[in-house]
Amino acid sequence: MEIDVGQYASKKEMYDHINASLTQMLRGNGDSVAGLANASALLKLFLEDINWVGFYLVKNGLLTLGPFQGKPAVMQIRPGEGVCGTAVEEGKTRRVDDVHTCTNHIACDLASSSEIVVPLIKNGETLGVLDIDSPVPARFDEEDERGLESLAATLTSLVFN
Ligand code: SME
């Protein structure tokens, strides 16, 4: 599958392009593992300065490692635990500029400096999270948050039926 990463005048323009590619890729594909695997590959391709991108999915009340790109990671996270579990408990995006000063952070890759976790919520139910780590401090800003939340909305509507 050939994907043009291209050049963008703004982050919004880049996220709009990712969203269009994601929508095209996922439409008509009912398999959630295949969809999330390609979504993590797509994000790894487009986003600069990231060392881990992937999904944790709620299974039997625990966040369980799903498709991802990066180093092997912790396989289960309890609600309230780590940045991922906190995002699930609060039902909102968590941005951490410096994971080393965050007491509630689970280190999976020592190279990680900053992190963003976006919950995947459908009809009020949290189905999982999109988690992205960066070796650059404060890598994620409000524009990333908005862009990734729009991708999360696409994922919840097209991957989880
Ligand atoms: N740092 C996460 C754990 C998952 S890894 O980053 C892949 C956390 O604190 O929840």
Image (cartoon, rainbow, N blue to C red):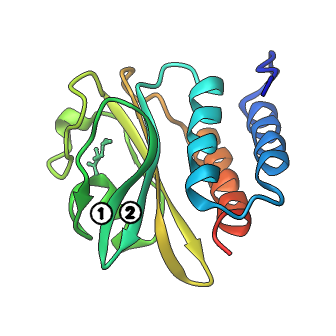
Q: Which mark is residue 142?
A: none
* Residue receiving disc 1: 85
**Figure check: 25 above or below 50:** below
Report whether the residue tagged 2 is closer than 8 Å to ligand 1.
no
Q: Amino acid at mark 1?
A: Gly
Residue positioned most to the top: 7
Q: Of residues 142 and 57, which is closer to you in this image?
A: 57
Report the side of 79 relative to 33 (left or right). Answer: left
Query: CB of residue at label 1: within 8 Å of ligand 1?
Result: yes
Tell me residue 99's x, y (percent).
25, 37
Instruction: From the viewer's perspective, tell me whether residue 112 is left or right of residue 23.
Output: left
The x, y position of residue 12, in whole percent, is 76, 37
Query: Under tag 2, what secondary structure?
Result: helix
Quadrant of the image for the C terminus?
Answer: bottom right
Query: Do labels 1 and 2 touch, CB within 8 Å?
Result: yes
Who is closer to the viewer here, 37 or 88?
A: 37
